[in-house]
Amino acid sequence: MRSLLITALVALAAIPAPAFGQPAPIQASATLSARDAVAATAAAAAATLAAEQRRADQVIRGLRANIGRLENEVAAGRTSIAALTAAREALIQELASRDRQYAEEIRRFRDAVERIA
């Protein structure tokens, strides 16, 4: 999701802009349409990214709540430490998955920047 936003922003940056202090040249409508399309794509990607982040945050909150519940049950002797350990491992796996996804998105962004440069 983030990679779509990054790609759109890189594409937007590649569209030539007037120099600072210079009047904007008259542009063909195709360029304006391309800018509008890139802007719309970037906005859609940002909205999608925000929705995905909220969903992922809910998953993390749910895993943490489950760990809290299991900690109380272990303290009360109603459940085993193995169940608590499994819940903690699930949280660690979710966080590790996010780290891998983030690293991949950074790699894609760097590749896109290198192709432009």
Image (cartoon, helix red, strand yellow):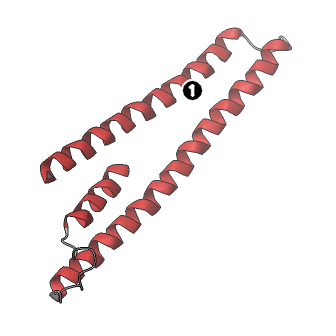
Relative to 99, does residue 79 appear above or below in the rendering? above
Residue type highlighted by circle 1: Leu
Residue 17: image location, x then y, percent: 22, 74
Q: Is residue 77 left or right of residue 99?
A: right
The residue shown at (76%, 19%) is: 71
Left or right side of 91 for 7: left
Answer yes or no: is residue 10 visible: yes
For the point 25% across and 63% down, the residue is 13
Q: Is residue 15 above or below residue 80?
A: below
Quadrant of residue 15 within the rendered picture:
bottom left
Q: Position of residue 111 (x, y in %)?
A: 19, 43
- Any part of residue 1 in sight: no
Determine which residue is flagged by label 1.
91
Q: Quadrant of residue 21?
A: bottom left
Where's residue 77, x and y in %?
A: 83, 10
What residue is shown at x 17% (from left), y 86% (from top)? Answer: 27
Residue at disc 1, secondary structure: helix
